[in-house]
Amino acid sequence: MPKLKTRKSAKKRFKITATGKILRKRAAHSHMQRKKSTRRKMELSKPTTVSGADKKRVKRMLGKLK
């Protein structure tokens, strides 16, 4: 079976940690910031993990699925 090609868009959006978790950026951080509180903006700037339902799909896009 041939190797899976990496999707470049996924490579730019996701990062795999040493323990195997997949990190992603949060939505709603880059626009309409005037009405958001400072605390909310700080929380939105931190990465979070991909949900379990999407983990297999993201790993396949990154070419890491075995």
Image (cartoon, rainbow, N blue to C red):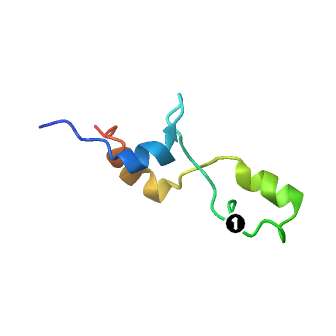
Question: SS at mark 1?
Answer: loop
Quarter of image, res 63: top left
- Tell me which residue sits at (36%, 42%) in the image: 62
Extreme right residue here?
Answer: 38
The x and y percentages for residue 38 are: 88, 57
- Tell me which residue sits at (87%, 63%) in the image: 37
Quarter of image, res 64: top left
> Considering depth in this image, is 2 or 20 the residue closer to the camera?
2
> Considering depth in this image, is 13 or 51 the residue closer to the camera?
13
Extreme top residue here?
Answer: 18
Quadrant where the N terminus sits is top left
Q: Is residue 31 above or below residue 23?
A: below
- Tell me which residue sits at (33%, 47%) in the image: 7
Q: Is residue 66 above or below residue 28?
A: above
Quadrant where the C terminus sits is top left
- Tell me which residue sits at (53%, 55%) in the image: 51
Q: Residues within 10 Å of mark 1 (few under 14, many from 20)?
A: few
- State the count of labels: 1
Q: Is residue 48 above or below residue 64?
A: below
Amino acid at dot 1 = His
The x and y percentages for residue 15 are: 51, 39
Extreme left residue here?
Answer: 1
> Considering depth in this image, is 33 or 45 the residue closer to the camera?
33
Image-based side of 27 in relation to 57, left or right: right
Q: Which residue is mark 1?
A: 31
Image-based side of 33 in relation to 28, left or right: right
